[in-house]
Each structure stands twice: as C-alpha cells, then as structure tokens.
Image: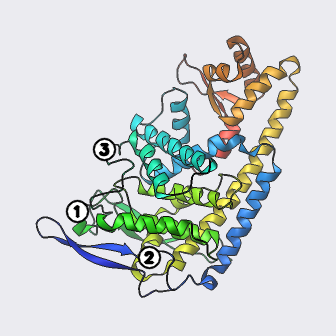
C-alpha cells in the first residue's frame, strides 16, 4: 500500500556547500493505518508458528537450560550481519579463556553484544520499562568494549550519520535483490540482480545510499517511538514489532551499533508484551540469510510508504524463525534424553558423569577448570567423568594444544549452531 506521506526529505548542507537530503519519518502509528488485508496471510502464519513454539517451550523439561547458547547464537549472527567474523565456537573459546580463531576485536564485539542483551533482558524482568533510557544503557554496554567505543556509547548522536554510497567502488558491499515467495509457496529466495550498499558508511552524506534524520530531530523522534511502544491500540503485536524495528533503523539514533540494537529491540519488545514465553525468537539468522533483501525492504517504505511490504517480509521471518526454533528445541531435547540414558548406564560413575553432562547442556564447550569450578568435583574425578563421556561418544577433545584441554558436546553444538 503506497502512502503519499510517510516521511519527508529535507535538504541540508555541509561545509563547502555540498547539499544532501536527510529523511525524517512520520511518527508512528502510520497514517493511513496498516492494511491488515495485505498482511493477513503472513500474520496468521506467524501467529501460529509462535504459538507452536510457545507450546514446545511449555512441554519440554527445563527449557531455559539452553538460554545461554541461544543468546550467544543471536549475538554471533547479529554481529555477522555487520561484518564481524567471529563464530559461536570463537565466542565460547573466548569465554573459556582459550584462543579464538579470529582477531580479539571481533570476538570481544560479540561478547559485548551478549552483555548488552543480558542487561536488557534482566532490566525488563525486573520491571524496568522498555524506553529510550534502557536503549541507551544497552547501547553503552554494546559499544564500550568494542571497536565503537569512540563513537559516544550510550549517547544519542549529535552529528549527522549516513549509510552507503550511490557509487560503485571497491569498498562497497553487494546486496542481492530477490523476488518474494507467496505465503502459500516455498520460502526459498529466488535471487535476481544486485543492489549496492556500503553499510559501513559512504565517503560523505552527498553520495550516501541513505541519510537518516538530522541530529536536531533525533531526540523527538525517539521520544515518539517510546510512546508508540507503550501505546494501547488494536495493532497486532508482531505488526507493531515490525514497525518499531523499521522506525528505529530509519531514525538511526546512534553513531554506531544501530543495526544490532534495533534487532535486539524486537525480542525485548515481544517479551514486554508477553507474546513470547522464551527468548528463542531471534530474527538475525533470517536477516543474515537474506541480507540484501533485508536492506531493500527497510528502504522500500522510505520511497513510497509501502510499509505492508516490509511487514510481510518481517512476518515471514518470524514464521520461518519460529518454525526452525521449534524444530531445534525438539531435536535438542531428544538428544539430551538419548545421552542421559547413556550416562545412566555408567554404574557407579553415573553420578559424577551426570553432573558434568548437566553443565555441558548449559555450555557445550568447556575446560576442566570450568568443570571443576561449576561441579565442585575434584580434578581427577572431573577428568575421569569427561573420559567417560568421551567413551560414550557424547563429547570430544577439541584442544589445539597439549595444555589447556577443551571439550565439546558435539551433537548439541551442531544443532544450536545450525545456520551460523
């Protein structure tokens, strides 16, 4: 649905007289209202998928034992969208004090994302409202110990930022365009053609792919967004989450980290609404797999006001992500059950081996030092228990050196890391 007025372009200029246009979005909710008929098929599918995911969470024993890994997987994927090379294995090794396979800056950046996410989830669980203040707190944690630490962590920007470039040059990132599948067809993307965007930033606003609102407008726009997050209306929760994410990315309130904070905002909002019974609905994998289309769909409403197209893309992401999370949860708990039976057949060693196995379900990559610290078992008993789990084919030694042995719960790591 095209809207004559969803936002406006305002001419600005920099020193030297070069002019460029910044985009200022209208405050939410959009006017005219979202055409529910245009999004009804994907909305129904997404609601069903999330309902089924919530049902599985209620059915499995101790579903939150895997929170540790789900949060880290999201941190890795969201950071990879921004160009970070760290993998889940790198992050786990870093947290265990072992050497990662990527530069320390990359893995530290992902670790900061984990800290920021945990902070946001904890604040919300303790009753703190989802607000500009909380978003700034999250942003500060995200950037303070990362490569963005010099870009005013936790502060709404006071200068102009911009994304991409209209010109083709070696530093640009190619993004694939794609034709969408209908809700009744396969979700496979049919790629055709290319669009250009350098999301690390163009050379100047005048040749940028997109220039967000001027700094003087940002505080008011964020205040309006906060009001919309707490508004009571008839807009479906998932539709509201899609609008919030799009508005945040359009405002681009920080000098760095907007993409990661904006994706984190989706999960935080859905949790505040009681829509999710778990933190397992993270869309970063879907956005990463269709990265070019993700940026195209964010851009489309700024051109013609067609928010419905963006919302359908977002709802498809929810549908696919929830279905995958449901399948992954089922397979993980089948694996846990099967391996628990193996451990229970160890005879006298089953108790200590069971304790060790339990912490591998929480974090699938561990050192002996971590095992002894968490189980309070003696080092010889911990080593013996680890060897029992190796003999059962549950874990394997992934050490790269003779000292500092590190062990991996292979089956679990494979399931949780799918798509990474």
Q: Earlier in the sequence, mark 3 or mark 2?
A: 3
Give above or below for 160 relative to 401.
below
Of the two numbered discs 3 and 2 in the rendering, the one whose residue sits closer to the viewer: 3
Q: Earlier in the sequence, mark 1 or mark 2?
A: 1
Of the two numbered discs 3 and 1 in the rendering, the one whose residue sits closer to the viewer: 3
Residue 300, numbered circle: 2
Residue 213 visible in the snapshot: yes
Give the camera-side residue of 319 and 290: 319
Give SS at disc 1. Answer: loop
Residue 150, numbered circle: 3
Give SS at disc 2. Answer: helix
Give the camera-side residue of 19 and 173: 19
Occupied quadrant, residue 270: bottom right
Other residues around mark 2 within 10 Å, as few (<14) / some (14–19) / many (≥20): some
Residue 18, image x and y in percent? Answer: 15, 70
Residue 79, image x and y in percent? Answer: 47, 49
- Residue depicted at 22% across the width and 69% down the height: 206
Give above or below for 308 relative to 114.
below
The residue tagged 1 is 204
Occupied quadrant, residue 213: bottom left
Q: Earlier in the sequence, mark 3 or mark 1?
A: 3
């Amino acid at each position: 649905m095209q809207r004559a007025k969803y936002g406006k372009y305002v001419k600005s200029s920099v020193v030297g007289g070069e002019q460029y246009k910044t985009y200022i979005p209208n405050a939410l909710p959009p006017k005219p209202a979202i055409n529910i008929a245009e999004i009804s098929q994907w909305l129904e599918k997404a609601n069903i998928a999330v309902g089924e995911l919530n049902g599985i969470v209620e059915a499995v024993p101790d579903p939150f034992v895997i929170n540790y890994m789900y949060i880290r997987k999201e941190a890795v994927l969201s950071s990879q969208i921004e160009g970070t090379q760290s993998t889940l294995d790198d992050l786990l090794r870093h947290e265990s004090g072992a050497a990662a396979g990527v530069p320390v800056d990359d893995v530290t950046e992902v670790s900061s994302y984990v800290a920021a996410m945990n902070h946001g989830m904890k604040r919300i669980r303790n009753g703190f409202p989802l607000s500009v203040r909380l978003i700034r707190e999250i942003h500060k944690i995200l950037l303070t110990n990362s490569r963005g630490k010099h870009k005013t962590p936790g502060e709404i920007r006071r200068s102009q930022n911009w994304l991409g470039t209209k010109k083709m040059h070696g530093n640009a990132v190619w993004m694939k365009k794609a034709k969408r599948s209908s809700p009744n067809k396969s979700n496979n993307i049919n790629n055709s053609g290319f669009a250009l965007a350098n999301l690390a930033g163009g050379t100047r606003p005048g040749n940028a792919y997109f220039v967000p609102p001027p700094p003087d407008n940002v505080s008011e726009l964020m205040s309006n967004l906060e009001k919309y997050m707490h508004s009571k209306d008839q807009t479906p929760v998932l539709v509201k989450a899609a609008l919030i994410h799009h508005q945040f990315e359009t405002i681009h309130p920080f000098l760095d980290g907007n993409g990661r904070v904006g994706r984190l905002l989706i999960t935080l909002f859905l949790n505040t609404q009681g829509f999710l019974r778990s933190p397992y609905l993270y869309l970063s994998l879907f956005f990463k797999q269709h990265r070019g289309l993700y940026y195209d769909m964010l851009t489309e409403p700024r051109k013609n006001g067609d928010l419905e197209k963006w919302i359908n893309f977002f709802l498809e992401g929810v549908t696919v992500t929830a279905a995958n999370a449901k399948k992954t949860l089922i397979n993980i708990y089948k694996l846990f059950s099967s391996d628990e039976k193996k451990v229970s057949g160890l005879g006298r060693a089953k108790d200590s081996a069971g304790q060790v196995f339990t912490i591998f379900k929480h974090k699938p990559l561990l050192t002996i030092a971590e095992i002894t610290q968490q189980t309070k078992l003696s080092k010889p008993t911990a080593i013996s228990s680890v060897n029992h789990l190796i003999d059962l084919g549950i874990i394997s030694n992934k050490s790269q050196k003779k000292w500092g042995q590190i062990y991996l719960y292979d089956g679990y790591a494979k399931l949780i890391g799918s798509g990474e």
